[in-house]
Image (cartoon, helix red, strand yellow):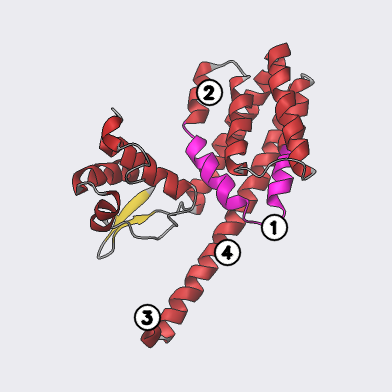
Amino acid sequence: MGKRQGASWDEDLSPIRDKVYQYLKNAILTGELKAGERIVERDLAEKLNISRTPIREALFRLESQGFVKTLPRRGVVVNRLSVDEVLEIFTLLAVLGGLAVKLAAKKVNDEDRRRLNELATKIERLLDGDAPEEDVAQFHLHIVDTLYRSAKSPRLYEMLTGLFDYVRAFAHVGYEQPGRLEEALREHLSVLRAVCDGNGELAESLIHVHMENAKQAYLAALRDANRRDGKRANDEWNNPSEN
């Protein structure tokens, strides 16, 4: 963030606090800011060359959404979702996503099939290693967004988009597990084909399988991170002179 090449924040009409909010949320969702990491207002203000007021406002907004939390004697840190929260979100995603692809299969038209087949072709090229390198987590969002829009249910889409930030975070972390990236792409491919074929029951079942596998990969990544954090804390306790 900071001052962009050839432009400044002042040229953008949106408030500074919104830019700071988007910047911090993106850093959290992409893993640039990791769970447990402190966010120091003073340091961030110096880095971005802005006052601390919009940073404080952005952090308050992020805390209300559960992305950060304030701890005694530590200040603001990036929040790590509890296991119960993860399970709740994946349950919602499975139910709502399953309904969306079932509706999409029922309502799919020629234009929908064209878009979905384009995505399927791109997935096949990625799996074959015959496609340019790209942000696969972002591609994941594009796939699910296209599927959910194909349901042609504005209210259902609105509910799902409220969970998109979590989808992005889960995909980013879950893909750290060996083999999960390719597995997820194959799962997406199967869902796309089922929707294109108009097989709603199969599409719904496949989404449930995908969400269960994604949940297990995310929880495994969290367990790995917790073990690393515990080892680091233990090393720091046993070797205080090295810190």
Residue 67 image offset from top left, x and y in percent:
39, 47
Q: Earlier in the sequence, mark 3 or mark 1?
A: 1
The local secondary structure at tag 3 comes to: loop
Q: Earlier in the sequence, mark 4 or mark 3?
A: 4
Magenta stretch bounds: 162-187
Q: CA distance from mark 2 to mark 3?
A: 49 Å
Find disc 4 in the rendering and name its residue.
224
Label 1 crowding class (10 Å Cα cut-off): few <14, some 14-19, many 20+?
few
Q: How far apart are the alpha carbons under marks 4 and 3?
A: 23 Å
Binning the other alpha carbons within 10 Å of mark 4 as few (below 14), some (14 to 19) or many (20 upward) gives: few
Q: Which residue is mark 3?
A: 243
Would residue 50 appear left or right of 144 to someone viewing this image?
left
**SS category of the residue bearing label 4:** helix
Spot occupied by residue 229 in the image (x, y as percentages of width and height): 48, 69
Cα distance, mark 1 to mark 2? 31 Å
**Quick one: which residue is furthest to the front in this view?**
6
**Residue named by callout 2:** 157
Residue with the mark numbered 1? 178
